[in-house]
Image: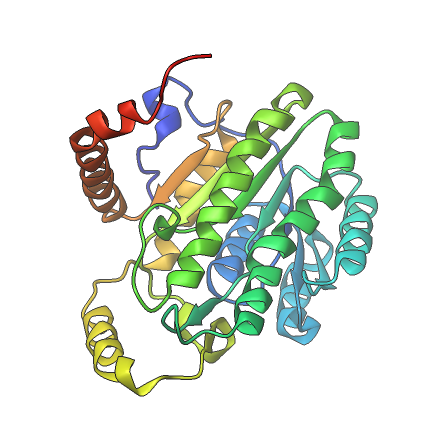
Amino acid sequence: MTTPSHPAAETGSAPVTGASSKIWFITGASRGFGRIWTEAALQRGDKVAATARNLASLADLADQYGANVLTLELDVTNPEQVKAVVAQAHAHFGRLDLVLNNAGYSLVGTIEEASLDDIRAMYETNVFGAVSVIQAALPLLRAQGHGHILGTSSNLGHVTLPVIGYYCSSKWAFEAIHESLAAEVAPFGIKVTIIEPGAYATEFGSPESLKFAAGIAVYTDFKNQFFGTLQNEKRGDPTATPAALFAAVDAEQPPLRLFLGSHNLPWVRTAYAERLATWEAWQTVSSAAQGEAK
């Protein structure tokens, strides 16, 4: 598997070759990217504290990788359990080099259809769960004097789609939290990278990764058309992603953001060009709203 170009390379910071074995803490390690990245890290000789809601889903990892993997049951929506499990993983391995927030799911439904309870539940996992892990890990990483916090976001952290608008909103929040975090923890030698996959053929579309809001009939045709469009979308091979992830974590100066996939940058570039054009077209009105300095 070849290593693709990445932002660190553009700034002259090549990945560390022959880097020593790293110790990971990964949430949502039972399926999708979490599973693929967990196995890839173990296969390259790293050690992993792999967590999931269902411990049985990780049993084969322990059988195959022995002492290099520590499998732990974790519900990221339970802050006390998060704190205990992060501490247990740190004590077991003696340190944590990489903390990867990967647990999450999508709420499917229009803005009108989704209930407040459904929205809150998704945020408990996608946003508050990630924050709980970060807050549990930071004192340990500070004491070490090093660490790298990674979070699985999406290209939908920059652009949006209808029908999954609340999921997109959770990723926009996720991005803002990690960008602020990066500035706050840099003085402690802690790095932050937001991983932004595009569309991939993972299990993210499975029932375990999706929750559907109760439907309203007036949106049926619109949603059917939307789902039909998604079915025709070309999806990347998720097993091609570990090399890019390793390039980032092995870099002396890792990127704050890392796209995974070839379609992300053109889509985001177009979206930002449209935003800039709108802001510029309305600049006279916006400037007038400044008023006189007092």
Look at the image and tell me whether residue 28 can be seen.
no
**Quarter holding residue 55:** bottom right
Q: Could you say which is closer to the camera, residue 165 or residue 46?
A: 165
Please report the residue visible at 61 percent of the width from the left and 32 percent of the height from the top.
20
Whole-percent x, y for residue 155 in the image? 35, 49
Please report the residue visible at 73 percent of the width from the left and 33 percent of the height from the top.
141
Whole-percent x, y for residue 17 in the image? 48, 27
Whole-percent x, y for residue 254 in the image? 48, 29
Please report the residue visible at 26 percent of the width from the left and 77 percent of the height from the top.
223
Decide: is 32 above or below 94: below
Total numbered labels: 0
Q: Residue furthest top?
A: 294
The figure's colour scheme reads rainbow
Decide: is 93 above or below 181: below
Please report the residue visible at 38 percent of the width from the left and 62 percent of the height from the top.
165
Q: Is residue 235 left or right of residue 167?
A: left
Decide: is 75 above or below 44: below
Q: Is residue 55 left or right of residue 281?
A: right
Look at the image and tell me whether residue 180 can be seen.
yes
Q: Could you say which is closer to the camera, residue 276 or residue 90?
A: 276
Whole-percent x, y for residue 137 in the image? 72, 42
Decide: is 115 above or below 240: below
